[in-house]
Image: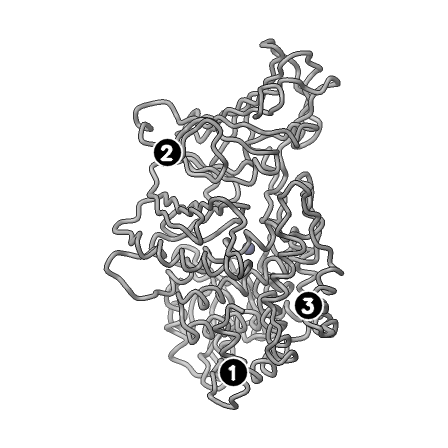
Amino acid sequence: MATRRESVQYRIVPVDPALHLFEVTLTIVKPASEGQQVSLPAWIPGSYMIREFARNIVSISARCEGRKVRLTKLDKHTWQAAPCKGELQIQYRVYAWDLSVRAAHLDQTHGFFNGTSVFLKVHGKEALPHIVDIQPPEGDAYAAWRVATSLPEHKARRHRFGTYIAGDYDELIDHPVEMGEFELIRFDAHGVPHEMAITGRVPRLDKARLAADLKKICEAQIAFFEPASRAAPMDRYVFLTLAVGDGYGGLEHRASTALICARNDLPVIGQAEMSDAYRGFLGLCSHEYFHTWNVKRIKPAVFAPYDLSQENYTTLLWLFEGFTSYYDDLMLLRSGVIDSSAYLKLIEKTINNVQRGSGRLKQSVAESSFDAWTKYYRQDENAPNAIVSYYAKGSLVALLLDLVIRRDTKGRRSLDDVMRALWRRYGRDFYSAKGGRGVSEPEVEALFDEITGLTLKPVFDLAVRGTRDLPLAEALAGFGIALTDRRTGAAPSMAVRTQRDGSDCKLGAVHQGGAAHKAGLSAGDVLVAIDGLRVTSGNLDGLLKRYRVGDTISVHAFRRDELMQWDLTLEPDAASQSVLEPREKPMTAVKLRNSWLRSQK
Ligand code: ZN
């Protein structure tokens, strides 16, 4: 039992929803005698960028035994209270107006927060139990509000306001909280209760279909990591979903995930087909759920524990994000939510995605991981020409390794065996009493060789530390899948990424070596006309369809406010060049393919 003396206590109230303010009262019964320090994290685990959440604290004050005491700010996110010989209380207000999964958001329709945005860390007391009293806004308008979170209840009843408890600060900030009038979907996965709380108006939501599909995906993943016991690593799991007009994002936690999606991604009663949008949403759920094992428990050593005051550098995000991206779609297939031809289309899309950017020839996925803080998370118009995604290319690295292992062990071993070994050795006991220490970079590669009996260093040198294109055509051929380049027949393209700017069509990125680059266009240029016909944000593709690859067009565009003209020769669209086609022989290849795409073993 946690007594008052032994815990750190918070009370959080949405004090002014219209002004987007949470008020937090932090009580420290026995503050540090030299003056208690407190700080707010600079980043949130899973999203590798310095966000300086303390910038949203709009007022803060401290009281010792009820009397106001000085609070000195030591740096951008740390405060120190004057020495206090009794109970210290720190009260502060947090501005919550970030409609994302990474921070906090509050208005009259709902409240959402991550602990990293609202709970000051009490230095030296991180390992104590942390108790939070979560309260609704005042007024009848909020009488129907409920609470959804995976944070364990202390004295509150499930879905009610009241006190919740975490074993330590690290746990406290790993359970986001949603409050409002959400829809609840519930299902069990291998005996463990799961739920999804959906906030936002979603007319005619097909709750039964969503629950059935999620159950299949969650059960496939639990059985993947623990084929014998089918034991899930958590007692309970919560998907917190915010449905908006247009949005996409997810952030993983140890027993929950926060998601944001477009309303139209969610299934409607009476529509049975698998739309791209719904499949994308299930893929997002599958991705964040897979993180329950891969990154929340199997972790890079530098994340055990996290240092939330500054960047934590690792070269391993290709493993934690890339492999998770590989398995998110594969789990849709293995759980029966999609079929193998839909799965091959998803791989095809990823290959084309990676091929489009010349940044892949300059940055390895290990470098992309290390520089996530300043490059992947802070992309500008030059990103496609300078960086590679450790998500997209990382998932192709997983694909290559899986295929190589299966081929070279004649189907006896696979990437699945390596993931399960990582789980058993580094993940399973991470939150147990003895605690986990994470996995180091050399240990990852050593484990691959140990489990497969192969020497995979050349593959890691090429795929993880190298910038040459992956030999996927050769690897896929061994599985009876032809990867062909369809430059002829591809749609004509300017090799740009466009941005809607009102009704204007603005160039968001110009791909190095592509048609627009050769012609002299630049990111930021606003297209005006092609061969004298007006270009708008909605009609560029339609206009280009009238031409063939190799045709030269006259392009008018504004650079800043100066009208300019270029001649541009259209090229085949890189986004549609690579095509995957299954073949029905040779039989050895077909057998390998079937065991890859179907097996749980
Ligand atoms: Zn992820």
Which residue occupies the foreground of this view, 112 or 555? 112
Q: Give the number of the disc on residue 146.
A: 2
Is 278 left or right of 417, judged from the image as shown?
Answer: left
C-alpha separation, residue under disc 3 versus residue under disc 1 = 22 Å
Q: Earlier in the sequence, mark 1 or mark 2?
A: 2
Judge whether residue 570 can be spotted in this image. Answer: no
Task: Name the element at disc 1.
Answer: helix
Q: Quadrant of ligand 1?
A: bottom right
Residue type, label 3: Ile
In this rendering, the label closer to the viewer, 3 or 2: 3
Residue placed under numbered mark 3 in the picture: 451
Task: Name the element at disc 3.
Answer: helix
Which residue occupies the foreground of this view, 470 or 334? 334
User: Does mark 2 have its CB less than 8 Å from ligand 1?
Assistant: no
Decide: marks 3, 1 in contact (CB < 8 A)? Answer: no
Q: Earlier in the sequence, mark 3 or mark 1?
A: 3
Using the image, determine if residue 170 lies above or below residue 264.
Answer: above
Decide: marks 3, 2 in contact (CB < 8 A)? Answer: no
In this rendering, the label closer to the viewer, 1 or 2: 1
Is 30 left or right of 523, judged from the image as shown?
Answer: right
Res 393 → quadrant: bottom right
Q: Position of residue 470 (x, y in %)?
A: 64, 75
Q: Give the number of the disc on residue 591.
A: 1
Residue type, label 1: Lys
Q: Quadrant of the N terminus?
A: top right
Q: Quadrant of the C terminus?
A: bottom right
Which residue occupies the foreground of this view, 446 or 363? 446
Res 174 → quadrant: top right
Task: Name the element at disc 2.
Answer: strand
